[in-house]
Amino acid sequence: MSRQIGEVILDLKQVSLSFGGVKALTDISFNVREHEIRAIIGPNGAGKSSMLNVINGVYRPQEGEIILRGQRFTKMNPYKAAQAGISRTFQNIALFKGMNVIDNLMTGRNLKIRSNLIQQAFWWGPARREELEHRAKVEDVIDFLEIQHIRKTPVGRLPYGLQKRVDLGRALAMEPSILLLDEPMAGMNVEEKQDMCRFILDVNDQFGTTIVLIEHDMAVVMDISDRVVVLDYGKKIGDGDPDEVRANPDVISAYLGASH
Amino acid sequence: MGFFLETLIGGLMAGMLYALVALGFVLIFKASGVFNFAQGAMVLFAALAMARFAEWIPGWFGLEGSYLGTAAAFVVAGALMFVVAWLIERLVLRHLVNQEGATLLMATLGIAYVLEGIGSTMFGSSIYTIDVGMPKDPVFLFEGIFPGGLLINKEDFIAALIAAVLVGLLTLFFQKTTTGRALRAVADDHQAAQSIGIPLNRIWVIVWCVAGLVALVAGVIWGSKLGVQFSLSTVALRALPVVILGGLTSVPGAIIGGLIIGVGEKLSEVYLGPMVGGGIEIWFAYVLALVVLLFRPQGLFGEKIIDRV
């Protein structure tokens, strides 16, 4: 592979998150290096999605800190995260159902738009030029994901597998430096999973995008990730490359049940 | 035939005005999932502001009797509505993100009373008139075709025209501009919109500003027809069946719903009224809305809500 795994780009330190009396995450630390594919795995209810939501700023942890490119974020929110180059997909697809594929992807360009409301209203010089530029970028994403044939279809009418792909497309349209994927392959058939795997690897390879993903399909995770962190009941029980994690006794007992 | 057409046209023009008020509801509901009970109060507040500024501003700057004074009053009233929108977002909505629909509804009910209170404190509570120089005299059209011609109220006609233009502009804004697209995105899914860097708070301010502007136009038109008084805030209640008929989530629905109700009211009053002793105009719209509710709970154009069980 051409990509070079670089320095630590995202560092989570002693993150704890609770909802009332329920501890979702307890004292979790791990880091993500530039250009790598980092997987978060664990049984149901292990706190994987919570972890992703902490990185994305949807949840604000009671303790711990997030360090992104050397900068400390104590009050992360989704808007700041987006500004800092983090984009994400959702476990239960959260596309804008009333809009077509192009419009959905165009919303991903929102942060990059410089023209103001008045210029837009009159479809005036800079606004027009900008719109065309962004449209070109969006077409690139459409080509990349091989969804040319559905570009004008309202996303609500697309089959599930394609909606997942559009969801990825919207995240890619932001040209993120870090991409968070929440179960990108959940509910897909084998062929769709293979396509999705290929897209994830290509994004990582061609654009050098750092990827943090949650996935249940172990074969897929072990195959495509550089390093894996394992959560169970909100605690970290393993961290390392796929082989290390596979050999970790705590991980084995969490997945297969401990023998007492 | 001439009489029927006259009634029909009268109904369409009244309907356009209902549509204008209904549009305020739909805009806010689409963008934030809030049924804005304060829409009527916003209409009243805007109309009060317009009436008073139109009186004060020419006095301050010596612009009596000129269109400049009226235009300035409109601009100032518009700016005031923007301030109101900003304050509502800042003081109320921002703190209620992701709360239940019922909570937000109650909050807007509160906003309605506060607005009415502040409105009458700032601008007084007597009856005012708004005169934006609309021609009041009726005209006769097509005198060659129909005996006696068609009697059209010029004021209504111009008002309907203004409403139609406003609706057209808003549709373009929503469909064609980047900000419009962001607004639709927020309407569809708050969380996803935030994650791609659409600033929710700013979008809400914009939506409430637009709704404020719509309220101002509605306030000026209704105010110059009926006079500006407290009961103007109940104009919103007359738009309620329009929203139910057209669907809460559809801009075209608000317009077509408004037209149907306007025409329905007038025609039923004229043709069915005598059979039941008259006065149907007042309740006809509500009955129509109820019937629609029975068969299409989402309204004629609203999104069908399908829940997975």
Image (cartoon, rainbow, N blue to C red):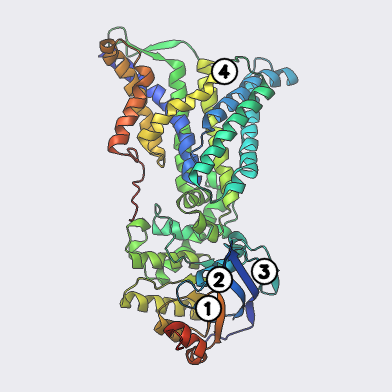
Q: Amino acid at mark 4?
A: Gln
| Residue tagged 3 | A63
- The image position of residue A219, as x and y in percent, is 40, 84
| Mark drawn on residue B56 | none
Looking at the image, residue A15 sits to the left or right of residue A207; the answer is right
Q: Amino acid at mark 2?
A: Met
Are discs 4 and 1 located on one and the same chain? no
- Marks 2/4 in contact by CB < 8 Å: the verdict is no
SS for callout 4:
loop
- Please tell me which residue is depicted at 30% across the width and 10% down the height of the picture: B277
| Mark drawn on residue B229 | 4
Looking at the image, residue B148 sits to the left or right of residue A252; the answer is left
For marks 2 and 1, give the one nearer the viewer: 1
Task: Mark 2: give few (<14), some (14-19) or many (20+) Cα within 10 Å.
Answer: many
For marks 4 and 1, give the one nearer the viewer: 1
Q: Amino acid at mark 3?
A: Glu
Q: Please, which chain is the residue tagged with disc 2 on?
A: A
Label 2 and label 4: CA atoms lie apart by: 55 Å
Observer-nearest of A171 and A212:
A212
Q: Please, which chain is the residue tagged with disc 1 on?
A: A
Tell me where residue B242 sits by quadrant: top left
| Residue tagged 2 | A51
The answer to whether residue B204 is visible is yes
Are discs 2 and 4 located on one and the same chain? no
Task: Name the residue furthest top.
Answer: B148
| Residue tagged 1 | A231
Task: Mark 4: give few (<14), some (14-19) or many (20+) Cα within 10 Å.
Answer: some
